[in-house]
Amino acid sequence: MANQQIDKVKLSDKFSLFNDHWNPRVIGELNGQQVKIAKFMGPFDWHHHEHEDEFFMVIKGSFEMRLRDKTIVLESGEFLIVPRGVEHCPVANEEAEVLMFEPASTVNTGNLENSERTRSNLEKL
């Protein structure tokens, strides 16, 4: 391999670069997976992902992951993995900063391909 730049990532610096909600940014890539961050505020859309599991970790704030049979509250420092095929709806009553880890092929709205919130070409920070 050629000389690759190896640097640490400071999450607070990355989160300070944007203010919008439900618009994930890529902050790292490894083994076909992407490390993404987004700010959550309000409700998202109910959706599922046919082929990808999703990892959500709260960095700052909190949010609810609504599932059809229960609601899981995630606080700062906690994470949840939503298995592929499970319908879910994240809801943040106040702004939350969230780190996600998922395959690069994952579209944020899953089976809702034409949602106004669908982001297919993510900005890299």
Image (cartoon, helix red, strand yellow):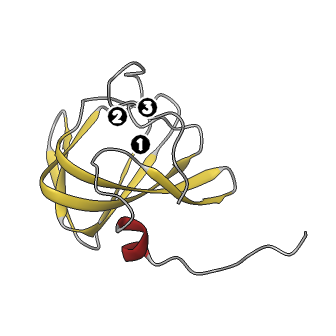
The mark found on residue 83 in the picture is: 1
Q: Residue furthest left?
A: 93
Crowdedness of circle 2 by 10 Å Cα count: few (<14), some, many (20+)?
few
SS class of the residue under badge 3? loop
Q: CA distance from mark 1 to mark 2?
A: 6 Å
Q: How many marks?
A: 3
Which one is closest to the eye, mark 3 or mark 1? 3
SS class of the residue under badge 2? loop
The mark found on residue 63 in the picture is: none
Circles 1, 2 touching at the beta carbon (< 8 Å):
yes
Look at label 2 and name its amino acid. Answer: Val
Which one is closest to the eye, mark 3 or mark 2? 3
Crowdedness of circle 3 by 10 Å Cα count: few (<14), some, many (20+)?
many
Q: Nearer the viewer, residue 54 or 123?
A: 123
Look at label 3 and name its amino acid. Answer: His
The mark found on residue 49 in the picture is: 3
Q: x, y (%) of residue 69?
A: 16, 36
Q: Measured along the vertical axis of the image, is residue 76 above or below residue 104?
A: below
Look at label 1 and name its amino acid. Answer: Pro
Look at 41% across and 23% down and name the residue there.
111
The residue labelled by disc 2 is 86
